[in-house]
Amino acid sequence: MPSYDSSRARFRLADRHIAVFAHLLDGETPPEELWESLVELQRIGLVGEEGELAPLLRDLLGALADPMVMVQVEITGQHGPVNHGVIVGQEAVFSHDGWPGEEESEYVSIEPNTLVWELSRKVNLHRGDKPEQDAPEVRLTTKLAALDAAFTALEQPGQDDDATRDTVRKALTEADPDLTGDALDHFLELVVSLNATWRITTAWDGRHDDRPSTMIRALAVWDCGPLGYWIREQPEEPIMPGQVNPDSPLVLVNSHSAEVWEKITNLLPDREELLIEGE
């Protein structure tokens, strides 16, 4: 069920409720499959009997109807994928957080200057130990088939940690015979230590070759707990449908929280990159 807290201008809404708002904003009657959602919104006072929208929705719906920047955060952990995001509107910025197994997300207004902090919170970015000066870069290369095989093996853990590692090691070597030695050991430890994988994608209307175009930037990271953060260089984000297959290369590069913070910051466009009417 949808709900709202007027004292903090926050709402719990599912995608189907957002779809109802979209139809009403366009002056349309929501289709039959959305009638139940419409009734739920009417029941809590966000929509009137004649389809009128509650005034307290003004900022949220204004951002949804005319976004300057859309940010999508996809996190996959123990409980499966969860989607979060941020909508940067002309006059307001709204953050929304999902929850495993829940249909609704919580939408809440935030200050624009807290945007990087908000995105870092969504991916649970924590300050870690500073890397040693001139520490060598660690780069691991395999293929997606090896990762799929490792995850399949982890779904049937052994009697203890050593048995589980042996099962995953066997799956990795069968899927990618070229993954050997220290690289195999290191990749194995990353897989069994994995807390979550996440990616942040930003999109906005800008210019490419001096023509209006949708601009996209993205970052994909593995959070491997005590083994730190690893940036997924390949497959390179954003991934288009049909772009990857089991033989596609998987390249991970060790990183740290300060570098990840900087890369999150760089995902956001500068004002001059935005296609703003009247400028």
Image (cartoon, rainbow, N blue to C red):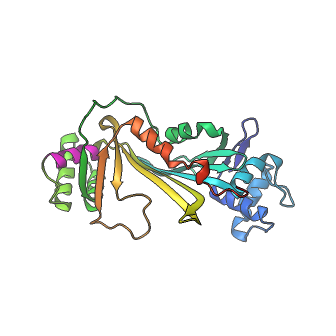
User: 212 or 14, which is in the foreground?
Assistant: 212
Residue 158 visible to the viewer? no
Q: Is residue 225 above or below residue 238?
A: above
- Quarter of the image for residue 174 reads bottom left
The spot of residue 253 in percent (x, y) is 30, 46
Q: Quadrant where the C terminus lies? A: bottom right
Residue drawn at (69%, 55%), measured in percent from left and top?
Answer: 64
Q: Is most of the magenta stretch helix, strand or loop? A: helix
Residue 128 visible to the viewer? yes
The spot of residue 211 in percent (x, y) is 58, 67
Whether residue 119 appears in magenta in the rendering, the answer is: no
Residue interval drawn in magenta: 182-191
Residue drawn at (36%, 37%), measured in percent from left and top?
Answer: 256
The spot of residue 141 in percent (x, y) is 24, 54
User: 143 or 153, which is in the foreground?
Assistant: 143
The answer to whether 46 appears left or right of 109 in the picture is: right
User: 188 or 3, which is in the foreground?
Assistant: 188
